Image (spheres, coloured by chain):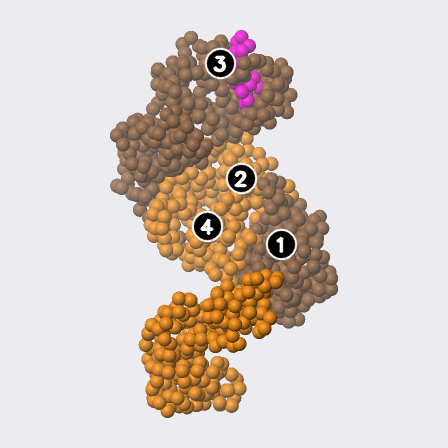
Amino acid sequence: MEDLRSNILAYIHKHETCSSTELCKEMNVEHQKIVGALNSILAFGEIISAQPEVTSRLELTDEGRQVADHGSHEAVLFASVPAGDGAPQSELMKSVPNAKIGFSKALANRWIRLDKSAPGGPRVYRQVESVSDRIRHCLQMVAALSLDSLTAEERAELKKRKLVQEGRVTVYRVAKGPAFTLTLAKEETELTAEMLATGVWQTLTFKAYNFKALGQQPDCGHLHPLLKVRAEFRQIFLEMGFQEMPTNRYVESSFWNFDALFQPQQHPARDAHDTFFLTEPAACRLDAEQADGYLARVKAVHSNGGYGSIGYNYDWKESEAQKNILRTHTTAVSARMLYQLAQQPQFQPTKYFSIDRVFRNESLDATHLAEFHQIEGLVADYNLNLCHLMGIIREFFHKLGIRRLRFKPAYNPYTEPSMEIFSYHEGLGKWVEIGNSGVFRPEMLLPMGLPESVSVIAWGLSLERPTMIKYGINNIRDLIGPKVDLKMICDS
Amino acid sequence: MPVVQIEKAALCQCLNRKDFTDDEVDELCFEFGLELDEVTSEREMLAKEQGDAKAAQMGDQLSDAVIYKIEVPANRYDLLCVEGLSRALMVFQSLAQPPLYKAVQPAAGMKQMRVAPSTAQIRPYVVCAMLRNLSFTPASYKSFIDLQDKLHQTICRQRSLVAIGTHDFDTLTGPFLYEALPPSDIVFKPLNQTKEFSAVELMQLYSGESHLKAYLPIIRDSPVYPVIKDANGVVLSMPPIINGDHSKITLNTKNVFIEATATDAHKASVVLDTLVCAFSQYCSEQFTVEAVQVNYPDGRASIYPSLAYRQVDIQVDYLRKGVGRSDSQLTIDEICNRLTRMCLVAKATSDATVSVTVPPTRHDVLHPCDVLEDLAIAIGYNNLEMSLPPTLCTGKQQPLNSLTDKLRLEVAFAGFTECLTFALCSEKDISERLRLPLDSLPAVRIANPKTLEFQVARTSLLPGILKTVHSNRSLPLPLKLFEIQDVVYKSTDSSGSAVNSRQLAAVYYGKSSGFELIHGLMDRIMQVLGVPVDQYKLSATEVATYFTGRCANVLYKGSSVGTIGVLHPETLAQFDLTLPASAFVFDVEKFL
């Protein structure tokens, strides 16, 4: 390569300008190699100039290239026939590549003859002592782009034998450039510490970079996408002045998960089909709740009502309230927090939030797992109403970039009024449910001891759904659990 | 939520409209708190269930009339049938007044139902009513059966709390007796059977019937079964399993005798009210029901259906504040009009109070807040003016969560990738697969898991991470994973509760064990946590999960907060891993 480049430069030095085909003939190498050498010289800067001219030329087919390298099929076959005794035809046909074409061409050229009646089957003998491989010679000339020496018959024959085809060849008109030189410096690929130390970098030429290639991936760690979205929601709540609730309590009593929320003991959600009950520890003691009469007040409001309510009119059982479960919502923790709030000497308006895991013993499908994350926000203050609830929900979703909202009446056992939150999904072109909300029932708040004029407004949604929409994930198992593809985590 | 089917034609008729677009129906449902679930037809439903071929084969037997499937709120039993749903919408659209339901006692005396003391052992309550001079159409007959079924599935809790039986009164002779007898003493011809069976034989017969076998356990093990008979000893029903064939209702039945037996008297009364309110519109004297007297063994007599109207006095101020409107924006008259559209007839009793009459169809109204919700629905939720709560507070994080987030970032900065696995797993995951004896673990056990994957709450983060490694073992090595989440331990005290513990676990999986990298990560975490060098060290120990001689306790201020080491080859084999791995697990809460 280096020799070729110096030779080219020397030739240009002598002739000022030439074509790449001329260089081919002169240097006796294929055109492709000349082009490679020219490109490599061009990479050094304006040493030479090269103007491309597209022309239509003969070029070798794959078979043509093989013949140019190893000889025509007939010459190869001829060479395989031993002088004198010859060889059996069947053997030649088996051992010589392209024997069929080679045999018929060599026969036509009268290079060989066939003795059909030889003992042991037809036998091939040389007819001449040596042959000149004209076809190979022609193809070599085509490769070197010196086509002038080919006759019209020769061209036609090469084409007919599919050894050459018409192709487009870019030929370059080469001339000296402004920085012409006869010697090329070696190109460096890397700037090294040694170059810096010796200062040699100042005299070196550096190979041009290919900026179109991709870089090497950094070896970094990644956070899980669901928990990244959790961080966004936490940030929104904190910006809005909400205080985080301690939700690190997966095992909860039925009392706090249901009874405290005025959810009756025969409610279907308390069925084994929906809720995970425990065998160990199967039930808990409700001593603290009993001590200040709270348990008795909850029992009363369920069984006979009170606080303006007629209650559910059934036989409330403490044993049912003691049953441990895996919490079905973080609202169990909200209830505990509101109860604590009610125990303060003076009620303090409060905003609480939490984002944590909850459990449902449901049938699993592409969008439902037995465990998922619930986002919950609540505000406790004097005289809050539906307008405040809708107002704070609007503010919350605006921060997420969701602007078109509407509210549908709904039923939740522990909120009244209750509203489902819908947003307009531009992609789907329809309203989709994005959360649930309501004002906690007086039957839940008043037994805790909260002042009558205090209302608690609350809303909740799942963390998985917005995350799946954000990252375009259709199956929840691709987001959570051990079967998750780590590439998804890295790419999200 | 329960779903009610209503034909488009029926809906148009009751709402006095020639036609509806599906969007209009959707909008009306949305406003009222219903959900239009599906727009379909008899043919489409069958095609969906049994395939297009079957639907095509049925030809003209199937109707193409448009059917709306509408989801109704779980506490609105009055909307569970077409009759109730369409009446509620008519009143909502001001096309009808709320009906006035009446229970009347016939001059000739009420029909009597005597309750025997033996029922106390199994199903102590019964309520009854009579629908007189009723005319069924095929559609209303089907709806009548459907509503009983829907009530059984919802408020009746699969017939365990309440079971309804309806009978052709003209085949029976009062007075009636509700008693409980040993199964072998109950013999009758049950519905749609050709011969008599004893209760013992029936329990056998129905154990193979898909729609009945679910109810058998409600009475199966009782020494006595409930049974209702007429004056001639004809068996009306053996609740909650099956009615007698003798008194079965047909399209031509004129007088329907309804009984509902129960373990919960209040729910039985609600169920009876709901049923008679919906279907008394087909009686010659509309919305009127004949009362029946139930005589209890203690001499108490109760008259059903109760059809009680309850008066609730509500402060107007409470209602106005609740929807954020002033006196001038929401007059008492408007409040009364709007509530009436929700079937809650209201009258102003002063400038400051309205008296609301809660009808027997609205057993969901427990408290004035339920009335407030109906007022808001009648105004339209989306017509209310939104405002932000005035509540001023300072945002605050849980210290444990804030520490967790700090650690997550630091560990990810160190080149580890976060996984998120399940809090529930199999017993094997936390014991055998980590080479630990199950009885040594303070695991919380689940009573009713649907699969083996949910037997226990995890006591370690390692199984989840190692399963994640297994699913990703074809990725370029090494894999460096971590998780900071809660594990759960059964409490050691007598409280009968359990506690979460926040743990951080990290795993290195590659061609070599990479222990020095895991160790380095632990050093880095201690540095980030600001633990002085002399307060943190590793001390050799043996834990079966780790390789012998390659395991240490992580000591912080002299006590163990976690373990670190090269995983035992058999631990790796348990998770089908073929390359070495190192790991640590420690308790984050010790560093709060």
Q: What is chain B's hue in the picture?
A: brown
Instruction: Determine which residue is flagged by label 4.
Output: A474
Do marks 3 and 4 share a chain? no
Asked if disc 3 and disc 4 are in contact, CB closer than 8 Å, the reply is no
As helix, strand or loop, the secondary structure at mark 3 comes to: loop
Q: Is residue B390 left or right of residue B498?
A: left
Kind of residue sitting beneath label 4: Asn
Q: Which is in the foreground here, disc 3 or disc 4? A: 4
Whether labels 3 and 1 share one chain: yes
User: What residue do we see at 43% from left, 90% from top?
Assistant: A183
Q: Identify the image quadrant of residue A32.
A: bottom left
Considering only order in the chain, which callout, 4 or 2, is on the residue closer to the N terminus?
A: 2
Q: What whole-number distance in Å separates the C-alpha atoms at marks 1 and 4?
A: 26 Å
Is the residue marked by circle 2 packed among few (<14), some (14-19), or many (20+) residues within 10 Å?
some
Q: Quadrant of the N terminus of chain B?
A: top left
Instruction: Give the residue number, with chain letter if any, for mark 2.
Output: A274
The disc label shown at residue A400, or none: none
Residue pointed to by mark 3: B247
The residue type indicated by label 3 comes to Ser
Residue B556, magenta (yes or no): no
Q: Label 3: few (<14), some or many (≥20) within 10 Å?
A: many
Tag 1: amino acid = Pro
**Residue drawn where x is 42% and y is 75% of the image:** A138
Q: Secondary structure at mark 4?
A: loop
Q: Which residues are magenta?
A: B225-246
Residue A336, given in percent of the width and then of the height, sits at 52, 47
Circle on res. B463: 1
